[in-house]
Image (tube, helix red, strand yellow):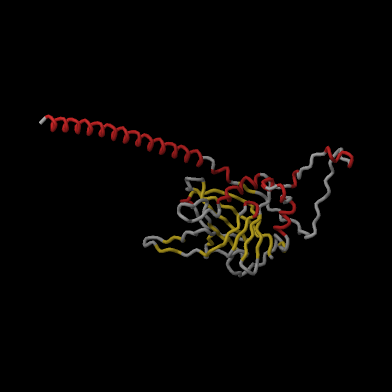
Amino acid sequence: MEAGYDYLLLRGRFQRRLGRITGIFLVVAGILLLASAGAYYGYAAKVRSTVTTLEVSVELIPPTPINRHFVSPARVVPGFSPSTISETPLYPGDLVSVDSWISPLSYEPLYLRIQNELVGFKFLDPNESTLMGPYAPANRIMIPAIDIDSNVTELSILDLGNSRTYETPRNSVGHIPETANAGESGGSWFFGHTEGLLSGEGSVFFTLQNVPKLLRNGESIYIITDNGSERFLYQATETRVVHQDNMELTESNGASIHLVSCVPRLVYDYRLIVTGELIGKQ
């Protein structure tokens, strides 16, 4: 009897201790969940308040025709002479892209990078009113300034019963087929994910959020589309942000391109729209 009583006593103590440990664990887990939720909502409120900084508008200034044999003007270093060459620091200076310093042995001067982007394009008269197209849909899009080079797919419309929506592009940029093809008169609309690694949708437009800063700093952003037989050159002129509930596809009098991705990061309830105007054809 004593052995049985001791067993029951020990089991009761164990159950009470287990209950206390379980209770403490649940309380700590609840506190952590509440703290995580609070931190996320605080972060979301903060980044939502900054989305307007992504809105930029610049004047379209078409580039001058590029000569394939363009040579940059010589740079004069004050106080330089052959006798002081060993004392003169050698550096690429302002003509070198900051990104190129990652690999100093293979840097590309900015003027050369821009030249390579524009060589071969016939620039269009901005006052030209001739209708462009029709052209085949683009199958590739490139934005060298932000390291985007992606294939393009035509998005299908999915029937959800009570509503219809466009399919989600996976590891590619999606073109809305009801809008103009690249190079044609009207607005061409392209969508790409900012981040979609967990869902397997890719992050083809992750760097699109860098365009507003580059435009604000005075850098020209060129967008190139390719359909296999023609290439079209656009220059970015505007970025704007709209809430997902107010997202609409708008038409254009001229030939324009609109690139769309989700912002801000980890919240994604706004849409960044980068707009460019057609300036060249190859």
User: Image quadrant for the C terminus?
Assistant: bottom right
Q: Quadrant of residue 29?
A: top left
Lateral position of residue 129 relative to residue 274, left or right: right
Of residues 18 and 193, the one nearer the viewer is 18
Up/down of 39 relative to 182, above or below: above
Indicate the position of residue 95 as horizontal and vertical percent values: 75, 47
Q: Residue at x 75, y 43 (%)?
A: 93
User: Image quadrant for the N terminus?
Assistant: top left
Of residues 96 and 219, the one nearer the viewer is 96
Q: Residue at x 61, y 69 (%)?
A: 135
Lateral position of residue 15 relative to residue 240, left or right: left
Q: Residue at x 65, y 63 (%)?
A: 232
Residue lying at the far left in this picture: please name it: 1
Q: How many badges with numbers are in the image?
A: 0
Indicate the position of residue 101 as horizontal and vertical percent values: 69, 45
Of residues 205 and 81, the one nearer the viewer is 81
Indicate the position of residue 227 as horizontal and vertical percent values: 61, 67
Q: Residue at x 41, y 38 (%)?
A: 36
Lateral position of residue 223 relative to residue 92, left or right: left
Up/down of 245 relative to 53, above or below: below
Of residues 78 and 271, the one nearer the viewer is 78
Indicate the position of residue 206 as horizontal and vertical percent values: 55, 51
